[in-house]
Image (spheres, helix red, strand yellow):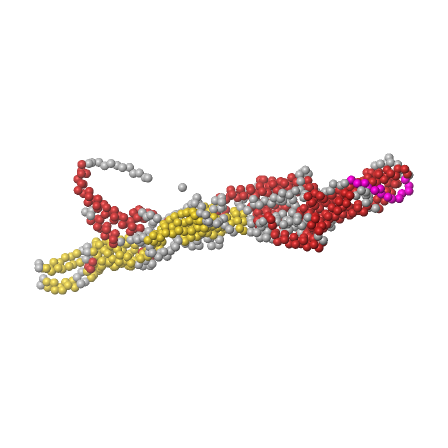
């Protein structure tokens, strides 16, 4: 870096001895998580403060956007669920199934869904004491509430050298919290039903019943007349399915629990055993679908089916216990800001548009050999590195004062030459008068769990069979008295009951509503026709019941077909610690001799290199010994006599010279004199010295001994004692008989000294001005 010695010399009293004061500022980040400010106590001495709210205020708008995006991802899900529950024309199969599951509670469920919809639209979840709402409100207020800053948090290390900015994914965090808060809703009986062995048993039972219904419906299509054993099978299968102890009914009861009510909206109105079966790879999502294919089931015996089910469930458990689930990566390290644990340093930003408000004094000021500069490069992007390029240039280790003085001396020399050249023409100026005044001039998705499912798959559709009409053979029983219609009807009703064939509603509609029919021996055929209609009706009713059973079974199996195994423990957040931005602490290389360093700070990746800053500074030595020249002043008068004998006799002179040129050597204390220091108030012991020098003229007659200090390196102020030579003479008969050398105390002195070369040049140029 180019120096301006004269300016340094003239202005050091103003710029280098005034203590720098900084108002200080608080660290903060921009909307992308890059640090834009650092709090500091004094020049170049930084520290972090733990005021997280203040530090991340700039991220508030980003927080609002992230939460709005998360709510917008969730809103279509609950709106889809509302549409399914409300409309019997949209996804009729799901609507019908949910009415069956929640027929006693559909209105309150719809209120719950509407509450969620309103909260997602407004960003505010109003208070509600209903236990069904509790988990949603907890998770919503923590992650999606619009007027609180929760998507970004800072973490300060114990030694205050690292500040981490973490970004919390509001969507993932909300889903995880909702899962963890609602997990206690899986009551003990539900947990038992969801145990692996019970899932295997229930799944097998559901599939077995489904296959049995399919067989009956297939047989029904080919029947030409009524068969009691077939009808009994219809009634028995229906009773087994609807029994409270059946696998189907246990599942229906389970789906009525809060756990499923609280989650089915999240899947866009589809119940799932595990509502959040998202893994890092969509192809890794394994469901029961390939297992529950009807053709596959038919090929497996009971033992094989149980084995395959168990094997599949073990795989599902392993998948859902994976620690790399995308959903669990709810927290990302956005910026890891690091500063050195001790010592001064300078901050650069790898993002050039960010400029830290700090003085460049640290990077531009000179240092000693064996020392280095510390550079903190912040906002380095993931995949980039930061480095220093150093160029070392040797230089003459003279202090800024000496360099400034050399400039002054050189200027005096030029003035002397000009003076000598202009002197002969000075008289010309007398021809002019007046002067010309001259005026002075002074010359900155998250992956949304979208399931594009049909209402019912092909296999499920087949369960709703379109029944083929058929003819039922007459029911045969003995009755000898056909004279009265009513006793015959009563007897027929009893017989139907005894055969487990009575459906009172249908019977009453067909027989008791036809009182005009009078049974006689010749009209038995009419009763046979009525009885045929009766058997047709009750069989049709039984078939319709099985169709409904088949549909409901298919709906439950569809849930299992598209579900993964639910986790029974709380989800733990996985932190992505690969920082989007980070800091790199760099140090320049120490040198052993006076050097002027040119340093380039840069970042680079596999494609580009970016220069983010340049600076230069000097590296100076410490000196134990230094020579100087200057002017000394003895504070008190003294007598220095000298007798000289010649042909004319003895001449005695008394010399009293209080001002005298002085030259000598300084022996510096401490670590020695450091030339590159510029402060007048520096407390460095190395500026103090012991001094011994001689006076000019008469160097042997004037000795100066003292101590002093460099006010700035190169400008020395010395005080001590002036020892003068004052010989004594023995004079007899007007002749010097004896001269004795004698040194005596001449008085205290003070001296101002500089580099001898500069001093001599100064005097030489000064004499030329005479």
Residue pictured at 46% horizontal, 49% vertical: 606
Region in magenta: 469-482
- Residue 704 locus on image (x, y percent): 24, 58
User: Closer to the camera, 359 or 726?
Assistant: 359
Q: Is residue 659 visible?
A: yes
Locate residue 92: give its quadrant.
top right
Residue 32 vs residue 670: left or right?
Answer: right
Tell me if residue 480 is in the magenta stretch: yes
Residue 358 vs residue 407: left or right?
Answer: right
Residue pictured at 23% horizontal, 45% vertical: 415
Q: Is residue 43 visible?
A: no
User: Closer to the camera, 268 or 688?
Assistant: 268
Q: How many marks?
A: 0
Helix, strand or loop: magenta stretch? loop
Tell me if residue 729 is in the magenta stretch: no
- Residue 70 locus on image (x, y percent): 57, 43
- Residue 486 locus on image (x, y percent): 87, 39
Residue pictured at 17% horizontal, 42% vertical: 424
- Residue 464 locus on image (x, y percent): 72, 42
Residue 660 vs residue 237: left or right?
Answer: left
User: Closer to the camera, 489 or 454?
Assistant: 454
- 718 up-or-down from 238: above or below: below
Locate residue 222: give its quadrant.
top right
User: Closer to the camera, 750 or 39?
Assistant: 39
User: What is the residue that sits farthest to the top in this orientation?
Assistant: 516
Residue 63 vs residue 569: left or right?
Answer: left
């Amino acid at each position: 870096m180019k120096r301006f010695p004269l300016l340094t010399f003239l202005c050091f009293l103003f710029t280098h001895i005034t203590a720098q004061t900084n108002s200080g500022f608080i660290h903060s980040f921009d909307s992308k998580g890059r640090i834009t400010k650092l709090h500091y106590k004094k020049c170049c001495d930084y520290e972090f403060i733990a005021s997280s709210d203040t530090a991340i205020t700039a991220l508030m708008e980003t927080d609002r956007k992230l939460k709005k995006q998360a709510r917008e991802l969730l809103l279509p899900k609950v709106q889809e669920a509302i549409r399914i529950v409300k409309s019997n024309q949209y996804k009729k199969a799901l609507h019908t199934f949910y009415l069956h599951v929640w027929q006693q509670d559909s209105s309150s469920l719809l209120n719950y869904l509407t509450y969620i919809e309103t909260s997602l639209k407004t960003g505010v979840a109003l208070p509600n004491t209903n236990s069904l709402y509790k988990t949603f409100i907890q998770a919503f207020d923590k992650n999606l509430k619009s007027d609180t800053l929760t998507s970004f948090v800072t973490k300060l290390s114990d030694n205050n050298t690292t500040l981490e900015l973490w970004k919390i994914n509001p969507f993932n965090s909300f889903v995880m919290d909702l899962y963890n808060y609602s997990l206690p809703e899986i009551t003990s009986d539900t947990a038992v039903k969801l145990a692996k062995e019970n899932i295997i048993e229930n799944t097998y039972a559901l599939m077995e019943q489904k296959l049995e219904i399919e067989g009956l419906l297939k047989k029904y299509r080919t029947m030409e007349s009524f068969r009691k054993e077939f009808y009994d099978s219809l009634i028995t299968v229906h009773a087994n399915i609807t029994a409270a102890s059946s696998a189907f009914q246990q599942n229906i009861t389970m789906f009525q629990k809060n756990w499923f009510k609280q989650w089915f909206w999240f899947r866009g109105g589809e119940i799932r055993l595990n509502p959040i079966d998202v893994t890092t790879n969509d192809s890794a999502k394994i469901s029961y679908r390939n297992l529950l294919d009807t053709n596959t089931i038919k090929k497996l015996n009971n033992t094989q089916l149980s084995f395959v089910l168990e094997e599949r469930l073990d795989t599902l458990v392993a998948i859902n216990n994976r620690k790399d689930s995308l959903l669990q990566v709810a927290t990302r390290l956005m910026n890891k800001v690091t500063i050195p644990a001790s010592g001064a340093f300078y901050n650069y930003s790898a993002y050039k548009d960010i400029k830290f408000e700090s003085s460049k004094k640290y990077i531009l000021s000179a240092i000693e050999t064996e020392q280095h500069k510390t550079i903190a490069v912040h906002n380095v992007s993931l995949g980039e590195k930061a480095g220093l390029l150093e160029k070392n240039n040797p230089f003459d280790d003279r202090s800024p004062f000496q360099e400034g003085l050399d400039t002054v001396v050189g200027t005096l020399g030029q003035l002397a030459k000009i003076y000598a050249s202009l002197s002969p023409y000075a008289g010309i100026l007398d021809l002019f008068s007046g002067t010309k005044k001259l005026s002075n001039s002074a010359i900155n998705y998250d992956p949304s769990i979208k399931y594009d499912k049909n209402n019912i798959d092909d296999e499920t559709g087949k369960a709703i069979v379109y029944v083929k009409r058929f003819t039922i053979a007459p029911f045969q029983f003995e009755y000898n008295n056909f004279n009265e219609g009513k006793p015959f009807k009563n007897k027929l009703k009893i017989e139907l009951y005894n055969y487990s064939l009575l459906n009172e509603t249908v019977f009453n509609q067909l027989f008791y509503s036809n009182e005009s029919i009078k049974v006689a021996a010749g009209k038995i055929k009419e009763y046979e026709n009525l009885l045929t209609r009766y058997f047709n009706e009750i069989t049709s009713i039984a078939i319709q019941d099985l169709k409904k059973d088949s549909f409901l079974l298919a709906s439950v199996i569809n849930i299992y077909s598209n579900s993964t195994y639910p986790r029974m423990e709380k989800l733990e957040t996985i932190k992505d610690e690969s920082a989007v931005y980070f800091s790199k602490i760099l140090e320049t290389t120490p040198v052993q001799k006076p050097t002027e360093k040119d340093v380039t700070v840069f970042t680079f990746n596999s494609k580009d290199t970016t220069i983010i800053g340049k600076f230069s500074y000097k590296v100076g030595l410490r000196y134990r010994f230094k020579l100087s020249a200057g002017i000394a002043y003895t504070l008190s008068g003294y007598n220095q006599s000298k007798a000289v004998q010649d042909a004319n006799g003895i001449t005695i002179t008394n010399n009293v010279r209080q001002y005298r040129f002085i030259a000598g050597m300084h022996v510096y204390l401490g670590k020695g004199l450091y030339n590159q220091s510029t402060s007048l108030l520096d407390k460095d012991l190395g500026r103090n010295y012991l001094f011994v020098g001689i006076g000019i003229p008469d160097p042997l007659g004037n000795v100066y001994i003292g101590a002093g200090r460099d006010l700035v390196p190169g400008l020395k102020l010395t005080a001590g004692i002036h020892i003068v030579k004052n010989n004594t003479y023995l004079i007899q008969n007007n002749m010097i008989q004896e001269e004795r050398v004698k040194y005596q105390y001449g008085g205290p002195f003070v001296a101002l000294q500089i580099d001898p070369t500069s001093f001599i040049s100064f005097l030489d140029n000064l004499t030329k001005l005479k």
